[in-house]
Amino acid sequence: MKTWKMRRLVAMLLTLLLALSLCSCGGGDQPSSGNNEGGGNSSGSGTGNNDNSSDNNSGNKGIIEFTMFTAMPGSEINDDNEIQQIIAEKIGAKVKETWLTGQTDSEAIGTIIAGGDYPDFINGGEAMKSLYDEGVLVPWDDYLDKYPNLKEMYTDKEWDSFRQDDGKIYWANVFQNTYGENRATTHNDEAFWIQVKVLEWAGYPEIHTLDQYFDVLDRYAAEHPTTENGTPTIPYTMLCEDWRYFCLENAPEFLDGYPNDGSVIVDKENLKIVDYNTTPTAKRYFAKLNEEYQAGNIDIEFATQTYDQYIAKLSTGAVLGMCDQWWDFAYSVNDVFKQQGLDQQGCNYVPLGLTINEGMENRWHTYADTLNNSSGVAITTSCKDIDAAFQFLNDMLDQEIHDLRFWGVEGVDYNVDENGLYYRTEEQRARCADPSYQASHMCNYSYMPQWLGTSKDGKNAMQPNEQASEFFDDLAEPLLNCFKAYGADSYVDLIGSVVEENAPWFPMYSYSNAMDTTTPGGIAWTKMGEVKHEWLPRVVMDPNFESTWEQYMEAYNAVNPQAFLDEMQAELERRAAA
Amino acid sequence: MKKKTKMKKGPADIAFVICNTIILAAFVVITLYPVLNTVALSFNDGIDAVRGGIHLIPRIFTTQNYRTVFNKNNIITGAYISVARTVIGTILALAANSLLAYVVSRKRFIFRSQLSLFWVITMYVNGGMIPTLILYRNLGLTNSFWVYVIPGMIGAFNMLVMRTYMEGLPDGLEESAQIDGAGPFTIFVRIISPLCKPVYATVALFVAVGQWNSWFDAMLYNRMSPEYTTLQYELMKLLSSVMQQGGSANPGTTGASTAVTPVTVRAAATVATMLPIICLYPFLQRYFVTGMTIGSVKE
Amino acid sequence: MKGKKIKISWKEIKRQKFLMLCTLCFVIYGIIFYYVPLGGWIMAFQNYKAKDGFFGSQFVGLDKFKFLFSDSTFIQVIRNTLAMGVLNLVSTFVMAIVFAILLNEVRNTMGKKLVQTISYLPHFLSWIIVTGILHDALSSTGIVNELLVNSGILKTPINFFAHKEYFWPIVAFANVWKETGWNAIVYLAAITSIDPSLYEAATIDGAGRWAKIKNITLPGIKPTIMILLIMNIGNVLNAGFEVQYLLGNGLVKSVSDTIDIYTLTWGVGQNDYSLGTAAGIFKSVVAIILIVAANAFAKKTGEETLF
């Protein structure tokens, strides 16, 4: 009996295994794998045709299917996504995207390198350099001239900035590229933000300095201890969680009137790197925060709140002001305001271009495109049809495809008025914001080459959020009033930053982001971050500011920031000379 | 303990019962709260939930979050692979662990102690992610289903649980079978295994829960093979977007807007993963309790 | 384990040939999947670069270890890891045993089953969810502060996460909260296997509940406790990173960072796998030493041993 049972069990097991292995062999269309020996097949000629596409074929006749890994978290789209299919039929190719999950970008790229299993396209975030070091990226130089749309993305000088040690181009950043006239309406940068209801109450005063800013916040809070629905007012909060602590940390750079070089200030006249952590302005800024904290005007939980809690707090409409990047809070918070009707009560935030002293220029807003050459999209040597891959990148920038990616299908996702201007109805706008609809219908290819600015038709914006009509239709009454009161047409006008070209070395953060611990400067950079994380909240909270500041400076100097600054200086000189 | 008919109930006893009930009730409340809170969130409108303040009852009821979860791409493939790896992985692990436990529980076996140590060590050392990945690649296990079930087949903890149980069985059984002329394998299959049903059930559940819940291996070894994705990995993609570390403050690198999964969808995904196990558990609880006897029942 | 010594002889080996054969298979399997990757430890002595591989990377001797142990932060994270490891170990252990015993004293079968079923649910919640709830509960407007203020214990709400002295207890509490029910299963099982006649005899002798718990239940599950203790002592340095990462903030950084977080920031975040591996080796070595010591100690005192 027993042996029979055992035998039956074994038989069942074997059947199962067999069934499974059959399924997994039959069902899978192996995406390009195991072809990483051919590192040198990049010099092929080809004319961008899909002749050897049969390997990658996925059922659709003649449609090449590429794979892509992006070392950023993102939302997946469905396999049967409608617009992806439309695009695939038009250009004969589609890309299956995979995103970062539960790892950091360098961790993910590290494991991909170790595993030796590369996708066709890859965006390695800040870890592009290791892919280049590994020699698995295809150089673009021989291809670029054949693909005009792609070539058009950057000027020759800009393309040069992507060149690696060997003088070749291996990737291109896909973001922050303006075609034609700049259409930016939002201030998609950092600022001190303030609710429009506070400005309205104060009679739309001119606010230029930190002192004036806090003065308005404090006076409003004193008169309105709670919001209309009884939540206690929080005059000012800031987020210090993990990498988002920039909200607390980098304001001194802007307060001194410098642009967002990120990790350092660049003194243009002397071409010198300046550390914004130790400037007199930094000390004054933190002293002011300390003063306000002691007076009870800063959220007592600022140092310990999580991002979720911070967003929840802002969403109640009880927070009057904070320093943050637009993209860090606006997308989630503005939706809630709208749903709750808080936008009609003037809870929306507008940016202020504060400086440390009255009468200084401010550079909070970056007008020109920020070229971050440390990351971007690349093609790997595992790709079986490199010409087709470049053709795909090129096609992404075709206006028709570009409209499909960002606007959607005409008549379904947007309409065209008699002047040829695109617009969305309320219903279409709501649908396009729905995650399920996005997954089944919309196909942004969000980490593929793309434009901002004006469409090639000369009328519309490349992306809906920059279309003026879309922007104004979305604004609530109090916001409109505020814009009117200051004579501004957009958030950008409101902050009033100096209009100028970016310096050739801008932004310096593209260098510091890619640093690692192989250099003393890289070690110092990591340690500086640790010290600041620990000390800055204390500097704000401790009743005895002076002595805490001194202790902080001592701890800060102990990690040898000079090593970091020296390396930045060297890079600055290199970039300025290039 | 069945005969507790004439238990005297002194005042101390009553006090004990009352205290005990209060303590356990408090325990239940604080344990249940997070679970119920998650369930409540999973049925709440996503934008509304951002305001916070949802406890046990959804404020704006919706089933949208579950629709988002179940409409997710690859969820069917993931479910299929998850079931397959749970079934096959459990069977393989059971076979391997029980045989190993049988070997090290033979009291006369010369290398029993050394073999135990050999496996105990594996609980505390590992070569790290990269070397392991390189090994699997060289063995051809990456981009395949087998990476889920072959490498983790033997677990020292499970082996120890089984060993202890087998050591508790009377020695006479084996001896009399030997006298009858049965070989060691026959003894293992026909004498020992039937008696070990409870412990087999326990280990099976441990392995099954582990297999069902794991996602990291799917990501690491089958990243580019969506046909071998697992349910948990798909759900993890929903969960993990808030855990992103080491981001950067520059839109130039992060793109226009990074998609942060609404807290409500995360809650729905959590409930979805818990549900099968919660449903399964009460049925296996019986075995679980009798089988889980590590380091006890000697003589 | 007190079996008679078996002399190693050819005859004995021949007799045990099936066991030997199995052992061979298991050892080969173990070597391939568990011991071969240990070759990766060589990274700790190199400046490992993926493109150069294990054989091409520059050999740097003990430099990585020197870097670790001369870094005051690393010493700090060892302290934190140990403190949290021990605190977690003790609190989850004690709570699980107490919970099992208390639950065992419940006479109502329905109630007992219900409580037990509920108790293991948090085991399946991910840390993201658990810490999110903890953050809300302990915030200045959260339920804990509300209770403390309303009952007059506190005058103004306190920000629990801003004080270093609360961090370790909060982490321990989080662990207890999540794992007590799951861990208690083992002890509940052990209790059920205690001979019921022992309790009956004690009842006849007039022993109360406490006496029975002290004299029968606890000694009955002692072997279980011992072996799990030995096993878990090796995990003291595995205090994890998720909880600390999710609950920590700049103010408590000096007490919240663990070895794993250190490895993440330095090893992985900066692409320095060698440093991460060196820290991993340190952890493994400490774990093995602890385990062997605990096992030897148990052997000496005549307790249950692992190997």
Image: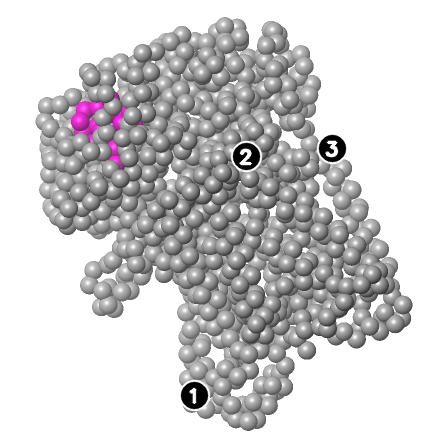
Visible residue check, residue C246:
no
Snapshot colouring: one colour
Instruction: Identify residue type, mark 1.
Output: Ala
Residue beneath disc 1: B12
Please, is residue B111 above or below residue A357 in the view?
Answer: below
Tell whether label 2 touches label 3 (CB within 8 Å).
Answer: no
Kind of residue at disc 3: Gly
Out of C24 and A44, give the one closest to the viewer: C24
Looking at the picture, tell me which residue is in the foreground, C198 or A63. Answer: C198
Give left or right: position of A409 versus C307.
left
Q: Quadrant of residue B281?
A: bottom right
User: In the orientation shown, which residue stands out farthest toward the right?
Assistant: B181
Q: Are marks 1 and 3 on the same chain?
A: no
- Alpha carbons under labels 1 and 2: distance apart: 62 Å
Q: Is residue A100 magenta?
A: no
What's the distance in space between the residues labelled 1 and 3, CA to CA? 70 Å
Instruction: Give the residues in magenta.
Output: A248-266
| Residue neighbourhood size for the residue with mark 3, other residues' Cα within 10 Å, grouped as few (<14), some (14–19), many (≥20) | few
For disc 2, the chain is A
Query: Is B170 situated above or below C162?
Result: below
